[in-house]
Image (cartoon, rainbow, N blue to C red):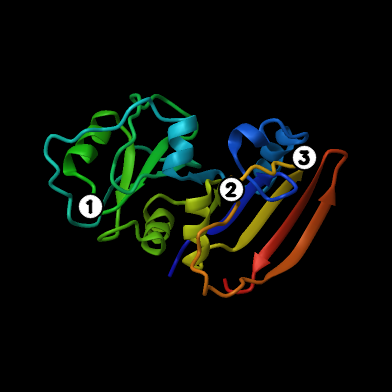
Amino acid sequence: MKKPYIVCHMMTSLDGRIDCAMTEQLPGVQEYYQILEALQAPTTVSGRVTAQLEMALPGDFQAKDSTPVGKEAFSRKTDAPGYEVVADTHGKLLWPDAGQEEKPLLILTSEQVPQEYLTYLDGRNISWLATGKERIDLARATEILATEFGVERMAVVGGSAINTSFLDAGLLDEVSILIGAGIDGRDGMPAVFDSLPMAHPVIPLRLTDVQKSTVALCGYGTPFST
């Protein structure tokens, strides 16, 4: 199977929490973006919750006709060196019309998405990819991203659910963690990876590089399983 090289790149507190409002207060947060650029992964992937907080318009899409597309399909509106991929399984997020962004949007969804939502994206000149009968088939999606969208390297940048989905599917080639000099400590805050079944085995990593700065520690590891 052809797929991009996939890195999960996150910034965390010392106790491994990734709440965006919290990490923005940590020393070294600007280094996160410098390291992301150094990873040479022009395509980034975010989950629905992160996208709703940081990128999408307020509100949810309300389909008048919920008939699903019911098949694998995609629409590439533009060729670009990198895409802002957002996973939105059932097609809920609202978006402005696409302009001439350097990194255009690409909505990743399942075959359960209403055809009406895909028509909505078409009307805003936003690329999309629908695959997976009940939920997004990430393995197949990464194959299509490689073969049809020309994606060679991409970074999964949160949140916890999308990170864990890529991990559980065995699709991550590398994990990059920037540890900020601070502790969250609040109960129930999301971690980089979360909610795998209790019986799931530990996923070992091989340390490939560690860099120390005055405000943060950056580590890179590669899962043995990929």
Quarter location, residue 173: bottom right
Q: In this view, does 220 lie above or below 55?
A: below
Q: What element carries label 3?
A: loop
Rendering coords of residue 32 (x, y %): 69, 40
Front position among marks 2 and 3: 3
The answer to whether 148 appears left or right of 219 in the picture is: left
Q: Is mark 2 on a helix, strand or loop?
A: loop
Is residue 200 among what the camera can see? yes
Looking at the rendered structure, which numbered label has been put on residue 182? 3
How much space separates mark 2 and mark 1, taking CA atoms? 29 Å
Give the residue at x 33% y 24%: 97
Front position among marks 3 and 1: 3
Q: Which of 79 and 156 is in front in this view?
A: 156
Looking at the rendered structure, which numbered label has been put on residue 178? none
Q: Is mark 1 on a helix, strand or loop?
A: loop
Q: Quadrant of the N terminus?
A: bottom left
Front position among marks 2 and 1: 1
User: Which residue has dot 1 on it?
Assistant: 112
Amino acid type, callout 1: Gln
Dot 2 or dot 1: first in sequence order is 2
Amino acid type, callout 2: Ala
Q: Nearer the viewer, residue 69 or 125?
A: 69
The answer to whether 60 appears left or right of 200 in the picture is: left
Give the residue at x 72% y 50%: 15
Q: Which of 66 and 97 is in front in this view?
A: 66
Amino acid type, callout 3: Gly
Dot 2 or dot 3: first in sequence order is 2
User: Which residue has dot 2 on it?
Assistant: 41
